[in-house]
Amino acid sequence: MSTTTPRTTLGLRERKKLEQRQRIIDCAYRMFAESGFEQTTMSAVASKADVSAKTVFNYFPTKEDLFFACAAGVEHDIAGPIKRRPSTQSVVAAVRADMQERLDRLLHAEFYAGLGSRGRIILDSPALQSKVRTFFETQERAVTEQLQRERTTEDGVPAEVAAAMIVAVIRLALDICMRGAAAGRPAEEVHAEATALVERSRPALEATTT
């Protein structure tokens, strides 16, 4: 697992910190994949990365934080596309466009293989599944707040209900993707199933956000 960060403007010390952080992430991901999340300790990751346990905790306060640094793409900023959309675009159109872009990544073999590996780790870990639930709860609050800011009337479906429906559809679509990849289902099949779910849900979502 690797992440790309512009380094041309960074000093030597900053580059070394980035390299050290990435080494920790790479070692942790291999260990999570080989031994499982619950069985892998932060001390073992530190030893594998040739750093102190304190250094690992300085970068990642919890083991869950370390995993999700490895698992780029698992977390999903749902409120962001709503905030950034042009005034002429509806809430549902913005969410759908962002979601379709994410779903289309499934058709890239390397991404799909990585999603399967990360998915197997998550599905085998109650702690990580709890972290995922907390993440979506946080996203639901963020979407609610954004919808409330945009409301000009108290009429219609409450923002909390609309946000819950939006997040539920996205969560279910992403769950289809993760479980499908983890089970080794064909990417095209999983892509079609998740896309169909989003499309079938669109009328109901539009009814709650207009």
Image (tube, grey):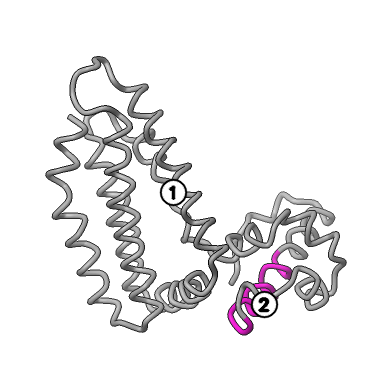
Question: Is 57 displayed left or right of 62 in the figure?
Answer: right
> In the rendered image, which residue does mark 2 sit on?
39
Q: Position of residue 13 (x, y in %)?
A: 84, 55
What is the quadrant of residue 58 in the picture? bottom right
Identify the mark at residue 56; answer none if there is no mark.
none
Q: Where is residue 207 in the image (x, y as percent from the top left)?
A: 14, 36
Farthest residue toward the front? Answer: 126
What is the quadrant of residue 116 in the picture? bottom left
The type of residue carrying mark 2 is: Gln
State the residue in front, 87 or 8: 87
State the residue in front, 107 or 206: 206
Q: Is mark 1 on a helix, strand or loop?
A: helix
- Type of secondary structure dominating the magenta stretch: helix
Disc 1 packing (10 Å; few <14; some 14–19; many ≥20): many
Question: Is 142 displayed left or right of 128 in the figure?
Answer: left
Q: Give the range drawn in magenta.
A: 22-35
